[in-house]
Amino acid sequence: MARDEAPSNPFNDKDALLANVALLYYGEGLTQSEIAKRLSVSRPTIVNMLRECRDRGIVEIRVDGEVLAASALSRQLVARYGLEDAYVSRCRIGGDKPPARGESLAQLARVAAMAVLDVVRPGDTVGVAWGETIKSVADAMPRQPVEDVTVCQMIGSMVSDRVAASEDCAIRIANCLNASCYTLHAPAVLSSRDLAASLRSEPTIAKQLERLQRLDVAIYSIGNTDPDTHLIAAGIATKDQVADAVDAGAAGILCCRYIDLNGNPVDLPPNERVVAVEVDHLRAAKRKLVVIAGQDRLRAAQAILNGKLATHLCVDEALAVALLQAD
């Protein structure tokens, strides 16, 4: 009688080794140098193995979002701005030197990734925006399935030197949540008002945009209106156009659309050429997790908060302090 075949196993010896290294580091608390000595390899090898463990989902790190929202700064932000929750990231303790932007953004993204898991619930329809901050959040997301979640891309396809294609953010977060994903099959900004209007009326695109009117959760950031804004870097608007918008009262840039200090849309180019969620539809989302990096976005953050465009706010410590000190 033939022996039953052993069930197939997708893992191998390397996977088992990586898992053991992860247990030594995260479970037993050994240092990287101690593990390297124990396994007779170099410390950089252990560093690379631990990074591969995280990248491949062999080990996942999750911090309870409720704890992140329990700091004094968080509670003060909630009380002052009428938020449901606020999450404040901290890079350094003590010292006068502020953290580098890359270091600060990376920590903020990790905190925001935990906030996503705190905010998203089974059965939700989740809208995901684009930009450097949201891409960082997507990259920091652990694999944590949430039952029956749908993720929708909130802005059409766009690529810049700073950030990968806009659909990448939605797809990455959807994969981490084990959610279905609806990408927006259109450019974010068209060459003319008429072409944009025609494309928005196409049945497939119209149906995708309609989903964005009924979001349970929206995850997005806001850009400032400085000359180095991503809107200019991505070729979506010129410096003169942004300057004109500022003269007209624009305080921030939300999914390629300007808003004023009260969170109201400022109808100036490229607004009429954009294929993306409308500001009022963002406002209508039941839960709005807004992730904002840097004290230079103070005015933009105030526009979000004044306009009731956030129920959950994730900011770094410097911006949190600035928001609390603002008039």
Image (spheres, helix red, strand yellow):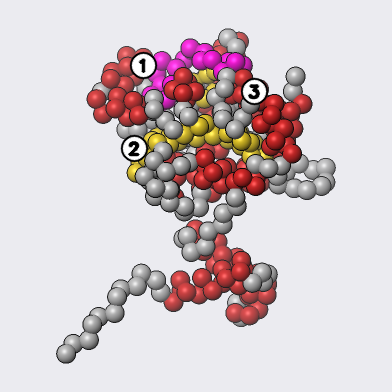
Q: Nearer the viewer, residue 103 or 10?
A: 10
- Mark identifier at residue 182: 2
Which of the pair 143/84 is nearer the observer? 84
Residue 89 covered by magenta stretch: no
Q: Position of residue 85 (x, y in %)?
A: 61, 35
Relative height, residue 238 to residue 43 (above, below): above
Res. 55 visible in picture: yes
Q: Residues within 10 Å of mark 1 (few under 14, many from 20)?
A: few
Q: Could you tell me how far apart the alpha carbons at marks 3 and 2 are, in whole angstroms?
A: 31 Å
Whether 267 is drawn above or below 115: the answer is: above
Which residue is denoted by mark 3 in the rendering?
302
Q: Quadrant of residue 298?
A: top right
Q: Real-space Cα distance between discs 1 and 2?
A: 25 Å
Residue neighbourhood size for the residue with mark 2, other residues' Cα within 10 Å, grouped as few (<14), some (14–19), many (≥20): some
The residue to which callout 1 is attached is 192
In-image side of 46 versus 173 (left or right): right
Residue 125 location, quadrant: top left
Tell me the element at label 3.
helix
Residue type indicated by callout 3: Gln
Mark-to-mark CA distance, 1 and 3: 31 Å
The residue sitting at 47% across, 15% down in the picture is 269
* Magenta stretch in the rendered image: 260-278
